[in-house]
Amino acid sequence: MLTCKMPAQENPEAWPFNDAEGEWKSATATFTKETNGASYGKYSAGLSTMLFNRGSTCGACFELRCVDHIRWCLPGSPTVILTATDFCPPNYGLSADYGGWCNFPQEHFEMSETAFAEIAERMADIVPVQYRRVNCDRSGGLRFTITGNSHFYQVLVTNVGLDGEVLAVKVKGSKTGWIPMARNWGQNWQCNVDLKGQPLSFEVTTSDKRTLTSYNVAPANWQVGQTFEGKQF
């Protein structure tokens, strides 16, 4: 799976998505044999438009359990914790119960095969599930992966604890003040300021309005493609 790639087109009627933490809600789930999971390993999932929220839900954690299907759900209804890492695009040429699982307004998880097998039989094509938002249990600090070029600076923020959902990011070079960054897609944030040759600090705010500042995370000689680790919530 990719890490929170923004779709080319989305349905604005699906926004905003607001889910009270701890409340179980109904959805469906399938799995994909692609198990890379980007920076979050194999316990990951793509979200339908209704859940994706223009990419802001990327990095958020969900607890899922298979329910109400004697044949496909594993005994005892075990749960699994997933990180949202991708967008599951709609397919309006197929019905919502046969191939068009991610069509609006369906709430659907396209899970990694490893995660799916912990709650349901692999032979199942689609299963009913219940889900709820949970805090993310992360090891290590926030990770900042730098991409772009001298005219287009971008950073991917991953491994975010607490609710895992980043609301705002600011960057500061040694020669600048704090610069608000714009969401490019998912948890990729951009600005058009040339920060080459400056050590970089980051300020990250999550959707529950908590802010964390990591000073001088990247040294002055940072290069595009490198990942640096900051503090953790």
Image (tube, helix red, strand yellow):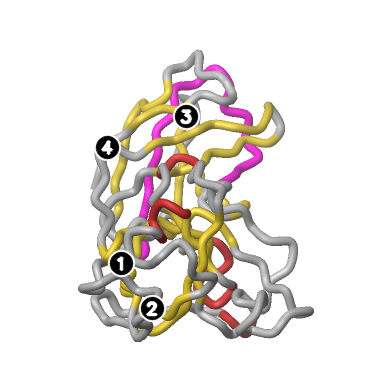
The disc at residue 115 is none
Figure check: 177 above or below 16? above
Q: Which residue is drawn at 43% across and 60% down?
A: 167
**Element under disc 1:** strand
Neighbour tally class for label 4: few under 14, some 14-19, many 20 plus, Cα within 10 Å: some
How many numbered circles does the render carry?
4
Q: Distance between the residues labelled 1 and 3?
A: 38 Å
Residue under circle 4? 231
Name the residue nearer the viewer: 47 or 99.
Answer: 99
Percent from the top left, x then y, of residue 42?
42, 46
Amino acid type shown at disc 2? Arg
Closer to the eye: label 2 or 3: 2
Which residue: 59% across, 39% down? 154
In the picture of the structure, the residue carrying the numbered disc 3 is 173
Q: Mark 2 points at which residue?
A: 71
Task: Tell me where residue 70 appears, x and y as whole percent.
Answer: 34, 82
**Identity of the residue furthest to the left in this view:** 76
Using the image, determine if residue 219 lies above or below residue 164: above
Expressed as whole percent of the image width and height from the top left, the position of residue 173 reads 47, 29
Residue 183 appears in view:
no
Q: Give the range drawn in magenta.
A: 189-208
Amino acid at circle 3:
Gly
**In this rendering, does residue 14 appear at all?**
yes
